[in-house]
Amino acid sequence: MRILSVYYGHDASCTLLEDGKPVVVLEKERLTRTKHDQGLMDLEGILADYGWDPETIDMITINPWVRPTLDGKWWQWELQGDTYLKYPDYMLDEWRGAPEGRYSQHQIRLFGRWYDGYAVDHHLAHIAGALFASPFEEAGILTADGGGDYRMCALAYGSGNKIHEIEYGWGHEYKKKQLNIGSVWASIGEYNFGMKRLEGAGKLMGLASYGTAHDKIVEAIKHLMLYHPFAAFPSHKFDRQNGLSLKPEETFAQDVCTSLQKATEDYYLEAAQRMKSWKPVNNLVMTGGCSMNCIANTAIHQSGLFEDTWVAAQPHDGGLGLGAALFVWHHVLGHSRNPSALSPYLGTDAGDISEDFIPAIIDYLEQGNSVGLCYGRAESGPRALGHRSILLDPRLADGKDRLNDHVKHREWYRPFAPMVLGDWGVPSKFMSYIVPTSADEIPAVTHVDGTSRPQIVGPGDDPFVVKLLTAWHEKTGCKVLLNTSFNCQEPLVDTVEQARATWQRTGLDVFVCPEGIETKT
């Protein structure tokens, strides 16, 4: 059975699912080179690239923001029946219940024909994408972001192939106010720091480690995170011209970010405790854009509330198409699942790479060179995990500044992550948790607070990455490499041609792809 799943909001994506297995997950920004790009993708071209004929598609799934976008220009398909999809009134319905009210069946016209289809609620797609891509048979699910389909956060319980129950709002009475963590991060980044709205949160999380949390600021931010659904969004509480202008190098600005982080952790731990009281599960899966917050994830993981936790490789909105497809396949159609972690390598295929390149790569790294890797299937999700990565020796004292200044061209306070051979005590396959590290041993990947967010690599992971790290360890005695995304003020590179162009216009030293190893000298 073939399912085409389309998500067309910011971080738009397209998923081809065949018999429950992802054939490909493509994010629009990777193809157009516009960060967080939105709107429909070239679906006919994508189908042709992967050998799918429109006649062979059995079902289509769509999301999110179904009701708002039906009034806008994004909606380009014909729907049989009423103007609106038959969603319940989100402002009046109950705040806890089964997920049946969060998806609806439709006839959807595309490629000149009618298809059976489903529209899946924003957070339900997040929830399904997290649980059904996890290694857990049963788990609680926590989701939070800047909002989708009129909701900002939820708790859920699922097992096997079913999402059994959802609670929206994390216990804050929905008819009076909602908890909106994600929008406050975005708004402070945009209106106080002058950052792009969809990029501010990631930057502020790095800056948060430089300051000190103050109780009064924490409480003010926690109050701001709660708002009346019929009043202004949090962003309206910030004035572009008269609001407080903050600069990253200022102590107060850093303290605001640290307090913002503390407020987030407080709400996260409160939600985790509520989840455990509601459903005494052993495992918790975290998703939504806010689960990119490694410190908050770690606070829950170390709380002792759960035996294990998990964050999928695609917790952001770019994973909604995949989540909707998995929800329909498992929950709606009833297909069973074998709980196992879904591979993050679901994107464009750049071709196989020879393991014969590894000795030369090790030599270049040991000489202090930065090395760009582009091979195999691209990572699905916001983290580079070896296939579209820039590597560097983490022992270099000037490594962070070199990459920030001459390769990435980004803010001085933003840290880099380690790729680690072995087990560091956290389930951080996708850079979702933090661990203590030493600036004396691996300064290039140790943040100012003495932590790193590692990509843990083990025997069952990508063979080339495992062998590269093993060879590096044997040669140097170090089990760690700095690993950052292969890009420069742009989306993650997708093709060899894009990667080579980025290598050529930046201070990146060495480029490695299936065609060979390239240098600038």
Image: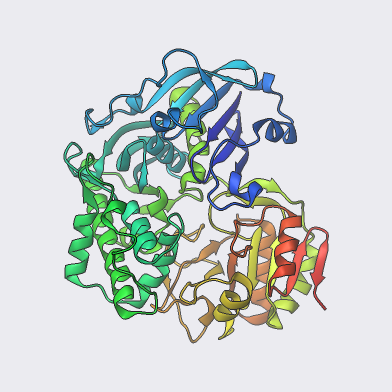
Q: Quadrant of the C terminus?
A: bottom right
Residue 434 in view here: no
Drawn side of residue 76 relative to residue 64, left or right? right
Work out whether residue 401 or residue 468 is closer to the camera in this orientation and state it: 401
Question: Would you say 16 lies left or right of 359 here?
Answer: left
Q: Position of residue 385 (x, y in %)?
A: 59, 59
Give residue 194's quadrant in the image: bottom left
Task: State the residue in front, 256 or 75.
Answer: 75
Residue 161 appears at what percent x and percent y? Answer: 43, 31
**Tag count in the figure?**
0
Q: Position of residue 263 (x, y in %)?
A: 25, 62
In this orientation, which residue lies closer to the viewer: 3 or 303?
Answer: 3
Q: How is the image coloured?
A: rainbow
In the figure, is residue 460 to the left or right of 126? right
Q: Nearer the viewer, residue 83 or 206?
A: 83
Q: Image point 35% across, 71% down: which residue?
A: 208
- Residue that lies at the very extreme toward the top in this rendered image: 81
Relative vertical location of residue 4 with respect to residue 203 in this rendering, above or below: above
- The residue depicted at 70 percent of the width and 79 percent of the height is 369
Picture quadrant of residue 162: top left
Whether residue 89 is visible to the viewer of this picture, yes or no, is: yes
Give the quadrant of residue 237: bottom left
Q: Position of residue 4 (x, y in %)?
A: 59, 29
Quarter of the image containing the N terminus? top right
